[in-house]
Amino acid sequence: MKAKRCWIYVTSGMLFLLSFFAGVITFAQVADKAQIQQEFRRRLSESDGISVIVSVITKEKSVEESMTSRLQEDVERELENSEIKIIPKEDLEYAPGRPRLGVYLVMYQEPNLKDMYLFSFRVVHFEDASLARNYKYAEGVCWDSGLYIGRERTAVMRSVVKTHVQKYINDYLAANPKPPKRQKKEQLRY
């Protein structure tokens, strides 16, 4: 009986220590994540617009084309509603750094479920850069949503992607605040 009680105490102590260390690690990850987000925002500062690139990969060509078109429209609408300048692809070569917002989605339809997909996506703002060690061309990541994986219907998938685009927009606007709009002189007179 004493051995069993001792074993319970040892096991409880180990679980407590493991829980404590997991909490410390989680706290460190939260601090790291906040620091990374702050760095991403800093990299977005002084930006003057963005070009949108959407890439969808799936087996069905018609679904791929349809989803690419819908996501392109969704992302551009969100940016326009936030008053972020969209750089047309034909003008991208003339924009400093060629800023691009890439939305990448991979979809796999589950054979047994209609309109249900396994998917992964990522939203990335990247620009042209040069390496410090040899000044060669590179693509620099300025903001990254991370890689997300899920299992949803297409409408929900679009909503999840839009949520991450909205996070990008929030960070972009925090780094590039809009000047307050001036009131018309007529409105100022009483």
Image (tube, grey):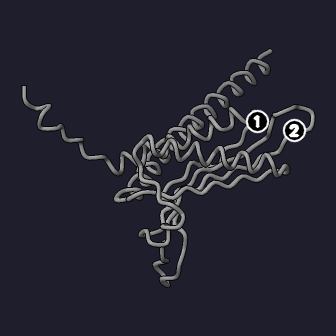
Disc ID at residue 140: none
* Amino acid bearing label 2: Glu
Q: Measured from the top left, where is residue 25 in percent x and y?
A: 56, 41
SS class, disc 1: strand
* Residue under the point 49% across and 72% down: 93
* Amino acid bearing label 1: Arg
Q: Measured from the top left, where is residue 189 in percent x and y?
A: 7, 30
Q: Measured from the top left, where is residue 151 in percent x and y?
A: 76, 36
What residue is disc 2 on?
110
Seen from the viewer's position, the closer of residues 10 and 90 is 90
Sequence-first tag of 2 and 1: 2
Disc 1 residue crowd, few under 14, some 14–19, many 20+, Cα 10 Å: some
Is 137 drawn above or below residue 84 in the view shown? below
Could you say which quadrant of the image residue 156 lies in?
top right
Image quadrant where one finds the N terminus: top right
Could you say which quadrant of the image residue 118 lies in?
top right
What residue is disc 1 on?
151
Distance from Cα at disc 2 to Cα at disc 1:
9 Å
